[in-house]
Amino acid sequence: MGDPQVLSYRPSAGEFAWTFGGVPPVARIRPGTILELWTEDCFAGRVRGPEDLVSRVCEGPYLNPQTGPFYVEGAEPGDTVAVHFVSVEPARDWAASTTVPLFGALTSTHLTATLQDPLPELVWIWELDRSARLCRFSARDSELTADLPMEPMHGTVGVAPANMEVRSALVPDAFGGNLDTPEMRAGVTCYLGVNVPGALLSIGDGHARQGEGETCGVAVECAMNSVVVVELLKGLATPWPRLESDTHIMSAGSARPLEDAFRVAQADLVGWVAGHTGLSMLDAYQFVSQAVEAPLANVVDTNYTSVAKLRKAWLPGGARPVMDGIHDQLREVAKSWR
Amino acid sequence: MGDPQVLSYRPSAGEFAWTFGGVPPVARIRPGTILELWTEDCFAGRVRGPEDLVSRVCEGPYLNPQTGPFYVEGAEPGDTVAVHFVSVEPARDWAASTTVPLFGALTSTHLTATLQDPLPELVWIWELDRSARLCRFSARDSELTADLPMEPMHGTVGVAPANMEVRSALVPDAFGGNLDTPEMRAGVTCYLGVNVPGALLSIGDGHARQGEGETCGVAVECAMNSVVVVELLKGLATPWPRLESDTHIMSAGSARPLEDAFRVAQADLVGWVAGHTGLSMLDAYQFVSQAVEAPLANVVDTNYTSVAKLRKAWLPGGARPVMDGIHDQLREVAKSWR
Amino acid sequence: MGDPQVLSYRPSAGEFAWTFGGVPPVARIRPGTILELWTEDCFAGRVRGPEDLVSRVCEGPYLNPQTGPFYVEGAEPGDTVAVHFVSVEPARDWAASTTVPLFGALTSTHLTATLQDPLPELVWIWELDRSARLCRFSARDSELTADLPMEPMHGTVGVAPANMEVRSALVPDAFGGNLDTPEMRAGVTCYLGVNVPGALLSIGDGHARQGEGETCGVAVECAMNSVVVVELLKGLATPWPRLESDTHIMSAGSARPLEDAFRVAQADLVGWVAGHTGLSMLDAYQFVSQAVEAPLANVVDTNYTSVAKLRKAWLPGGARPVMDGIHDQLREVAKSWR
Amino acid sequence: MGDPQVLSYRPSAGEFAWTFGGVPPVARIRPGTILELWTEDCFAGRVRGPEDLVSRVCEGPYLNPQTGPFYVEGAEPGDTVAVHFVSVEPARDWAASTTVPLFGALTSTHLTATLQDPLPELVWIWELDRSARLCRFSARDSELTADLPMEPMHGTVGVAPANMEVRSALVPDAFGGNLDTPEMRAGVTCYLGVNVPGALLSIGDGHARQGEGETCGVAVECAMNSVVVVELLKGLATPWPRLESDTHIMSAGSARPLEDAFRVAQADLVGWVAGHTGLSMLDAYQFVSQAVEAPLANVVDTNYTSVAKLRKAWLPGGARPVMDGIHDQLREVAKSWR
């Protein structure tokens, strides 16, 4: 294997994808390619100040623009695409968050339908201090401020869905998509099962930071300069999105109600641990039950997302590499880029 | 204030409480009292080896024995009891976990009713190495083992419920109870709203460790020697259980479906932050949305429990003490015991 | 068996029960007794006009007063109490309904917690024309009116819970309680499993009529003169409430989320049909799936309630009497009263 | 308006649609057209005997074949398509039902994930006596049989989704689709909001009968000869599917958890009643709460579906025609076909 191919891609205004599936690829890439990507924020860059209410400046399906999709050569249903996040860096020195009418966890919604009025629609512009790695919150109704650590991540990474479906970029599901988990950050590898030839990978929805659950429905949204390495695992099926960091393996389940998202993630992790360690399914159930962390991702999207997270060093038999050791390999490739 | 009163209490077999409410107090204590308690495990100590299936050795309501209740002098509805965990130490060098038929997150249950057979009923005996602070898992179906850090906690701490109710010790709700959150550990203060004169506090269900969500329904269950300080906050109502560590404040919501538990915890935390910092409710909503951690507690009990957790140092206006600064005071009291 | 014993009982203001369990019986009755009961409405009679907002005239646990409990002689855990509704007649020529802040299906609630304001609190006084059997709705915000058929029912019928619990009269669960199903009307027999000696049966919450789901959380609430016959089925356990009319058998499941209530009711009915007809469990599953009606009861209470309803004449093997034929016997006893 | 256009269409094996959206129309029709359609069963006709297990004879996305889509001339986003069912008649003298592994309400599923084994996979072939209008159930594990009334219906009727999405024909949502409500029968008009030019209407999934909730996940599935009239209501938006019979109006909400489907349907009906009668929203909430029926449709599909059903004669102000009186007009058109 020679030097990895590097593709830099910055979509212009008309070149975003608004769905997973149903869109022709913007480029074909070989497995191992390093992608240098620019992603726009979930508002398509239209929320720039306190007057830019989502209901006023955004419309219809044109939310959560995706950079992509990329056709991964050789990818076929039954394979897995590995996306290693080398770097996720805010592309602006500000980011926006908002309330959106009838969207979020602490409001009624179009599905949790009530007769109450929506909450007021407000915009918060966060200052990003990229050298200090801080996000500055400024209250709307008082002079109070607070600095939170910058912890950049991508809310959205996904491939085309199965069953001939095309899903809005706002949806998280088995194909990945709008998982909105703070775990999707630099240093992490995301594994996605391939459903269509070429996989059709796209990425978007950068967050300078996000709380677990994304309670108000909107994170600290900002455009990103991100670098990922894309690899292909032939003949290895991945039914639900999996993540791997240097220290943890994770499964991400997306469903409603939230306990079903939890069940999916935990069951996937139990199966993963059983398959990897040789534990029986019930032994793995017991082991995971005592060892797992369960950080919520989002409780606001079309499906809710729950993550099941396990420290690799704790696995019976030790931290033998999972997924053919691809994470460590991609860490090495990442170094070649820096 | 002189030296705190110390009460050591070790219930004998017939002296446990099996409910919150409906039981006369075992003792009256003054606010500020240090309680040195022994708590039995959730199996009432009956699961001692691989043959001790819960369905065989346990029966009916006699699960999750509580040590207490304690009548806190002066406590009245509208007040809050603060329970500071000074020390939580396994009382045995082993602990038990099990599957229980039709109980747990990855099985159908009496409520998530299906026509499938229950999972097999198994017991795992965990070795506790108290000096190394390790819990040793031994697989049932193979020779595999793994050591996990000992992180002792109490699954259950609660007061008598409101509305004249009496609830099984297996239930988590607004009165606390079987919250099953790993956050309930030494160094933490738990705040519970008082519903009846004397509050009627009880504690039980020690876990040598537990994963978030308590996936199989049962943690690493063991008897505990625990020390708590009990304080009373007059005229301060606490609608849902709150916790405070040296670094974080937390709200614990219990409900079904799980998104409702999430909503309760997050809304309580938003209200808490707004009241404490002077942020407007919507500013607090925005701030919490970006700053919160959302570790699940249990997704298996009568109600599911979700925790909303915020770093105190991040609060706008700085880490001014919450809840009248009682946590820091109790930390000092705790030192007097050691 | 001679003439049935008849007991007339009209509680005075201080004689209501506010919980299931935790209350001494008001009378002991022999199986077969006919009870002539007066029940107060769920507001304890305090909502009498448009100004009588629940938040103003009602308080704390004093909602949903129950007439009873009655100690059924000979009833022991493992038995079933059969309650046949001979007659359910509004005791007044008006009834009240309301919105209650943060209660109901089309509002956020204390559990489906949001930051929105509650809906406005309003009272509707319905006129009851008992000779024409009509309930007259008069709009608050216009001159519009509408007449709906009077279809009197009891929202609440229950026994003391299992596991030493005491539950608010607002709760529906395995012990019955606040099921709020329009199916609980004259001509119907309700079967409840006995959890404590004497069963401790109580009845309340009369509705002149109610929609399925009880959407706003409150029906057309009125005091009732009701006649029931109480019978005891020894050695027959009933895990969830069952109902029988001349034409249908029904199971009532109560849980959250609503799909769990559905699962409980359907699984109970499948088991009932299998046990009664000799169909295998999977054959009964198939048969019930094609034959069942699934009218919702309530989607507003502490637990939601779903009813699974099957026409007796459709059962394979014909309409052989279920539950030892007690329904038909009680129909005969009922005739003796008229 | 002259005689309605009549289009007879019987797709051959390769001509079915497997999604809503994403498929070119099979024909363009003018509003007012009568469609004489043949629809295949949900198994694509492959389950023909007890050995034809779904997991063996069906595959991947090729489930629930749709007849269509039809491009309705003049239909644009913001309009409503009215589909009046003139006739729904089984095309065979038998129908099939099955259990499907990890699908149905009384089993764990891919989302309600557990570690239990799936239920056994079985096929039931139902005999249809079309002259006697009966469906004959024959038990698999005994000699028992039962006759249930034939009540033919379509599980699936829908248009292309909004937001550029393409959804599997197994999905019910705001665009209609796999609602699986027994209310979708001859004599009923279904209203669907248009999301894309031409609406792209398709129909399938005939059931000789179905219980409410479709408990095992599969109805009495059979090919149908159906006749529908398709009309267009310009400038009238319909956010969720609505149905109208001679006696009732209905809203169908699809979501998870089931209480959200209930909320959607009830809120839509409350809004419909308010808009139609002039009742204020809260008066409509009160009125609907006391008058509504709430039959479940399905508790097994990707989204669950709940129906809110109101008797037109009960509406304040009387049974003035809803939806511009289109139902009565289509009833007249239907007569021209017979």
Image (spheres, coloured by chain):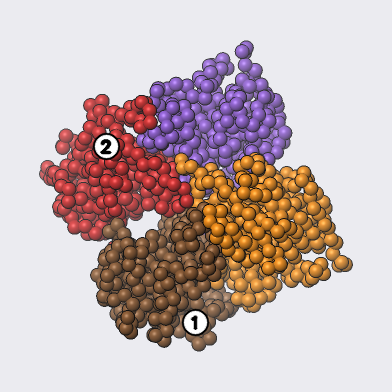
Chain colours: A red, B purple, C orange, D brown
- Whole-percent x and y of residue A203? 24, 47
Query: Which amino acid type corresponds to the residue marked 2 in the rendered image?
Result: Gly
Mark sitting on residue A49: 2
Mark sitting on residue B310: none
Residue situated furthest right in the rendering: C2
Both labels 2 and 1 in a single chain: no
- Whole-percent x and y of residue D279? 50, 58
Q: In which quarter of the image is the N terminus of chain A?
A: top left
Side of C79 relative to B220 (left or right): right
Side of C333 relative to D220 (left or right): right
Residue situated furthest top in the rendering: B2
Q: Residues within 10 Å of mark 1 (few under 14, many from 20)?
A: some
Height in image: C242 above or below B77? below
Height in image: B203 above or below D82? above
Query: Which amino acid type corresponds to the residue marked 1 in the rendered image?
Result: Glu
Height in image: A235 above or below D222? above
The residue depicted at 23 percent of the width and 40 percent of the height is: A223
Residue D135 or residue B7, whichever sits in front: D135
Side of C215 relative to A217 (left or right): right
The residue depicted at 73 percent of the width and 58 percent of the height is: C91
Side of A133 relative to D274 (left or right): left
Mark sitting on residue D127: 1
Q: Are marks 2 and 1 in contact (CB under 8 Å)?
A: no
- Letter of the chain that mark 2 sits on in the rendering: A
- Letter of the chain that mark 1 sits on in the rendering: D
Q: Mark 2 falls on what kind of element?
A: loop
Q: Which of marks 2 and 1 is in front?
A: 2
